[in-house]
Image: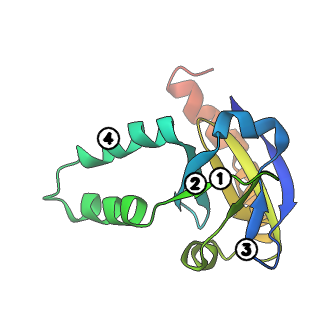
């Protein structure tokens, strides 16, 4: 299970260490792609295959579906986790997420999100201000 929030750094060679407690779930190879809200998604291969199959089932007649497929599938790259637990983030993904030196890795159960640390703090602060509204919506859906 991929959960938790971890602070790490992106080194000058664009490598990011995956937290030790998450490496077993991620495996030796994973898929890195554009996420939402200017973050990156890192999927274990089995989870990526499930998502890719769902994305491919979307009707391509809708522009928003094509755009999502292009962004996530076209922007994806298979990455290897090296002996020190690091992945290499290509420039196009590093630029997309605005990653600088400090990064946050957030576990979302079946995948990880990789955020620039400053942007994560801004995003998280805004989300926390809406906690009451989110709780009410979850209550309406029968979640709580």
Q: Marks 2 and 4, how far apart in space?
A: 16 Å
Q: Secondary structure at mark 2?
A: strand
75 relative to 89 in the view: left or right: left
Judge by depth and name the residue closer to the eye, 124 or 10: 10
* Discs 1, 2 touching: Cβ within 8 Å: yes
Quadrant position of residue 87: bottom right
Mark yes or no: residue 3 visible: no
Task: State how far apart marks 4 and 3 are (Cα).
Answer: 30 Å
Where does label 2 land, which residue? 41
Local secondary structure at mark 1: strand
Q: For the image shown, how many numbered marks are present on the structure?
A: 4
Judging by the rendered image, the residue that carries numbered circle 3 is 14
Q: Which residue is mark 1?
A: 113
Q: Residues within 10 Å of mark 3 (few under 14, many from 20)?
A: some
Q: Which mark is residue 84?
A: none
Residue 54 is labelled as 4
- Count residues near mark 2 (Cα–Cα under 10 Å), then give few for <14, some for 14-19, many for 20+: many
Mark sitting earlier along the chain (2/4): 2
Q: Quadrant of the N terminus?
A: top right
Q: Nearer the viewer, mark 4 or mark 3?
A: 3
């Amino acid at each position: 299970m991929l959960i938790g929030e971890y602070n790490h750094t992106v080194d000058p060679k664009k490598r990011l260490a995956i937290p030790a407690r998450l490496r077993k779930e991620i495996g030796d190879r994973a898929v890195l792609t554009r996420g939402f809200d200017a973050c990156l998604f890192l999927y274990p291969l089995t989870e990526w295959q499930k998502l890719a199959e769902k994305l491919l089932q979307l009707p391509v007649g809708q522009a928003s579906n094509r755009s999502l497929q292009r962004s996530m599938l076209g922007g994806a790259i298979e990455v290897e986790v090296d002996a020190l637990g690091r992945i290499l983030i290509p420039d196009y993904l590093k630029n997309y997420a605005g990653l600088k030196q400090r990064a946050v890795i957030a576990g979302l159960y079946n995948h990880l999100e990789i955020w620039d640390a400053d942007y994560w703090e801004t995003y998280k602060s805004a989300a926390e201000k809406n906690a009451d509204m989110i709780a009410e919506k979850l209550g309406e859906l029968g979640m709580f």
